[in-house]
Image: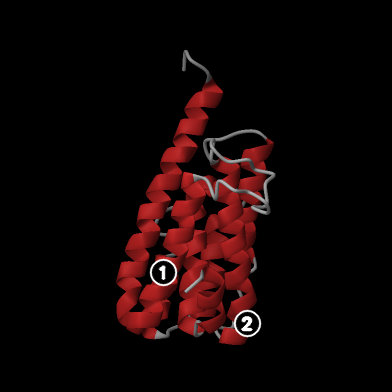
Amino acid sequence: MSLVELVARADARGLAAGGLACTDRCLPLLGGDDELLRPLWANLADDSDWAGNLKKARAALGPVEAAGVTGSVADDAARLVRRMLETAPAERTAEALRPWADACSAASLRVHRLLDPAADPDADGAGDTGGPSPLVAAELRRQTAVLELVAGHGAHGLRAALEVSVEGRRVLRAVVSRRARGAAGPGA
């Protein structure tokens, strides 16, 4: 099943997990604490106070600069990530979450495209015969895996979905680190 179909069929928990996972994987761009979104992940398992923990996560993030990378690409990517968290709905219903999860998916793919040295950041994929770059293709697989895990296992699939997200965060952190070293020059 395609990513678009998975988002269209996902229930509220799956949509929240999908959007949250996309946001979580991109946190290295904001210099965010890896544990920043952990309470929201817990909310998905126990149906506790999503809105309250969302408000706390936004407040904890505060104003930030693009972490470790500079230039317009980094600024654009950081803005996309910041917007993912800022636009998360306080209401945890499928109707409220579906547009957010879809937007987070697109934003996360755009972030990966912007940061991938093998990708053309201005490409939209139309007419691209080579397919997505390796970093973007890996992000597509992670997004699909998260939605499949939650759809197939409900609350029990959340731990595995979080592990997929953590792995993606490590990958993106490495990309950000390489870009920062490259921007610093050969003597840095």
Q: Residues within 10 Å of mark 2 (few under 14, many from 20)?
A: some
Q: Is residue 85 visible?
A: no
Q: Position of residue 156 (x, y in %)?
A: 30, 80
Residue with the mark numbered 2: 96
Q: Position of residue 175 (x, y in %)?
A: 46, 39
Cα gap from disc 1 to disc 2, whole angstroms: 19 Å
Q: Is residue 186 visible?
A: yes
Q: Amino acid at mark 2?
A: Ala
Residue lying at 31% horizontally and 70% vertically, measured from the top left:
159
Residue lying at 62% horizontally and 72% vertically, measured from the top left:
100
Q: Amino acid at mark 1?
A: Val
Judge by depth and name the residue closer to the eye, 162 or 54: 162
Drawn side of residue 140 relative to residue 8, left or right: left
Farthest residue toward the front?
129
Q: Residues within 10 Å of mark 1 (few under 14, many from 20)?
A: many
Is 65 situated above or below 16? above
Secondary structure under the numbered disc 2 in the rendered image: helix
Q: Earlier in the sequence, mark 1 or mark 2?
A: 2
Which mark, residue 8? Answer: none
Is 8 situated above or below 115? below
Is 188 situated above or below 144? above
Residue lying at 45% horizontally and 35% vertically, measured from the top left:
177
Residue with the mark numbered 1: 146
The reply to whether dot 1 and dot 2 touch (C-beta < 8 Å) is: no
